[in-house]
Image (spheres, helix red, strand yellow):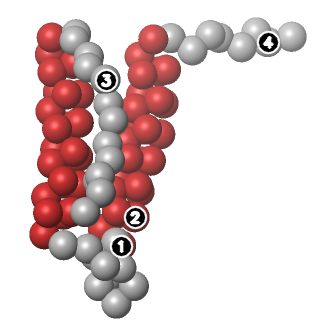
Amino acid sequence: MKWLSKENAREKFKRLAEYRVNQAVHYIGLIGNLSNDRAYDFNAEDIKKILGAIEAEVETVRKVFNEGKEKPRNFALGDD
């Protein structure tokens, strides 16, 4: 009987990174679908908030990789 080798840390990182980045790219694309002004009502402030939240989270991930720090993550457009 051949024993299955355990996944090492590098293999696990690669597997999870590929899956999670592909998921993030997919969902960012879905956010882009919200730009259909025939189906949705939005304004420049909404766009600014959405893109700001995405950019802030990317910056947080960059810092986590570089410094090992993390902060809470929440997003809401709020009331008009």
Q: Earlier in the sequence, mark 4 or mark 1?
A: 4
Q: Which residue is mark 1?
A: 33
Q: Which mark is residue 19?
A: none
Q: Which secondary structure lies at badge 1?
A: helix
Q: Which residue is mark 2?
A: 30
Residues at discs 1 and 2 in contact (Cβ within 8 Å) = yes
Q: Is residue 31 left or right of residue 54?
A: right
Q: CA distance from mark 1 to mark 2?
A: 5 Å
Dot in front, 3 or 4: 3
Q: Which residue is mark 4?
A: 2
Dot in front, 4 or 1: 1
Dot in front, 4 or 2: 2
Quadrant of the snapshot with the C terminus = bottom left
Q: CA distance from mark 3 to mark 2?
A: 23 Å
Mark 3 residue crowding within 10 angstroms, few (<14) / some (14–19) / many (20+): few
The amino acid type found where label 3 is placed reads: Pro
The amino acid type found where label 4 is placed reads: Lys
Where 32 falls versus 39 (above or below)? above
Q: CA distance from mark 1 to mark 3?
A: 26 Å
Q: Earlier in the sequence, mark 4 or mark 2?
A: 4
Estimate the x, y position of residue 41 in percent, counting from the top left: 31, 79
Mark 2 residue crowding within 10 angstroms, few (<14) / some (14–19) / many (20+): few
Residues at discs 3 and 2 in contact (Cβ within 8 Å) = no
Q: Which mark is residue 72?
A: 3
Q: Which secondary structure lies at badge 3?
A: loop
Residue at horizontal 22%, vertical 10%?
68
Residue at horizontal 86%, vertical 10%?
1
Q: Which secondary structure lies at badge 4?
A: loop
Q: Which secondary structure lies at badge 2?
A: helix
Q: CA distance from mark 3 to mark 4?
A: 45 Å
